[in-house]
């Protein structure tokens, strides 16, 4: 299937590891021109070197704790280079813990890094998408927007806010040829999952392996996802082939989520 992504400009957030990095590589392999964005320049350079080199890929160094600075850096890049057809919003999740004991600062930090930054990036990129008559905004969130996950109180709260922001945006932008969709990863083999398993191990006294196997047993597929499997779903939603898919939450979780 030709996904018609050749020479589409893509901004991929959180693109130096895990799902973000796998997505950048997958889109580049389909002919897209990638701009990576993250806060660690050395990791950005390493990831950049792993992309297919026949195209002019690039990167932006930015910290998602400061939405205003993030917006300005992206605006400068666009003015000096090009606009973007596709935005992949992807940011590491908040620390785990019960929602009742969470400090207010934890909510504020997560709200800033996720919803505020998603919003300023969308505002900055959408004018070009409207001019092109083509745009894709894909938010990498969590299956917790369908079924809250135990021990991830702040994450559950903020992910739900992002999902509702996304659905509202999809309704507002659909007539311009711009789709807005959410990909909901389940348990995926990333540094984030390793931290969650370690925390469970510490709380229960079980070994890392036992804790991991217990998680796998809650998944019908009986395994964790590879980041590349999430990247494949994201890449399809970014393509012209997905032009009539808009405003959805797509779980990629091996069947773990109990709800439809």
Image (cartoon, grey):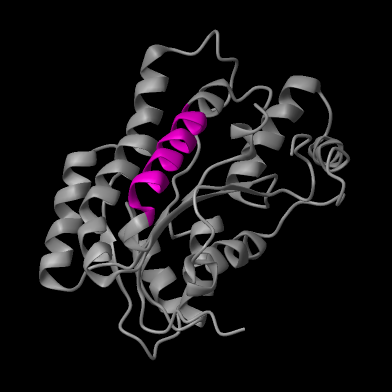
At 74% from the left and 39% from the top, the residue drawn is: 260
Residue 55 x %, y %: 35, 86
Give yes or no for residue 202 being in the magenta stretch.
no
Examine the residues drawn in magenta and state their main secondary structure. helix
Q: In the image, is residue 238 above or below residue 55?
A: above
Question: Which of these two is toward me, 202 or 136?
Answer: 136
Residue at the (70%, 45%) spot, across then down: 187
Q: Height in image: 210 above or below 109?
A: below
Residue 204: % across, % down: 80, 21
Q: Does the segment drawn in magenta span residue 172? A: yes
Q: Residue at x 59, y 33 (%)?
A: 145
The answer to whether 158 is drawn above or below residue 30 in the figure is: above
As drawn, which residue projects farthest toward the front? Answer: 175
Q: Is residue 222 above or below residue 97?
A: below
Answer yes or no: is residue 230 visible: yes
Side of 165 relative to 152 (left or right): left
- Residue 3, position as x, y percentages in the image: 53, 79
> Which quadrant of the figure contains the N terminus?
bottom right
Q: Is residue 22 visible?
A: no
Q: Is residue 256 left or right of residue 56?
A: right
Magenta segment? 158-174
Q: Nearer the viewer, residue 128 or 215?
A: 128
């Amino acid at each position: 299937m030709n996904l018609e992504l050749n020479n589409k400009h893509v901004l991929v957030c959180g693109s130096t590891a895990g799902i973000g990095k796998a997505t950048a590589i997958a889109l580049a392999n389909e002919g897209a021109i990638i701009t990576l964005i993250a806060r660690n320049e050395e990791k950005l350079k390493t990831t950049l070197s792993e992309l297919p080199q026949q195209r002019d890929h690039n990167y932006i160094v930015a910290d998602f704790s400061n939405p205003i600075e993030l917006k300005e850096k992206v605006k400068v890049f666009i003015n000096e280079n090009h606009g973007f057809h596709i935005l992949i919003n992807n940011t590491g999740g908040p620390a785990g813990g019960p929602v009742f004991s969470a400090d207010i600062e934890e909510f504020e930090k997560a709200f800033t890094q996720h919803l505020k930054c998603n919003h300023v990036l969308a505002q900055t990129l959408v004018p070009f998408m409207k001019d092109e008559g083509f745009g894709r905004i894909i938010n990498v969130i969590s299956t917790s927007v369908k079924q809250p996950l135990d021990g991830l109180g702040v994450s559950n709260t903020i992910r739900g806010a992002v999902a509702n922001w996304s659905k509202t945006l999809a309704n507002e932008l659909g007539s311009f040829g711009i789709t807005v969709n959410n990909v909901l990863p389940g348990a995926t083999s990333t540094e984030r999952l390793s931290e969650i398993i370690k925390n469970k191990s510490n709380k229960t006294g079980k070994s890392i392996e036992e804790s991991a196997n217990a998680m796998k047993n809650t998944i019908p597929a009986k395994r964790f996802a590879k980041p590349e499997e999430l990247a494949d779903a994201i890449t399809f939603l970014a393509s012209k082939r997905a032009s009539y898919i808009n405003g959805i939450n797509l779980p990629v979780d091996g069947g773990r989520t109990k709800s439809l």
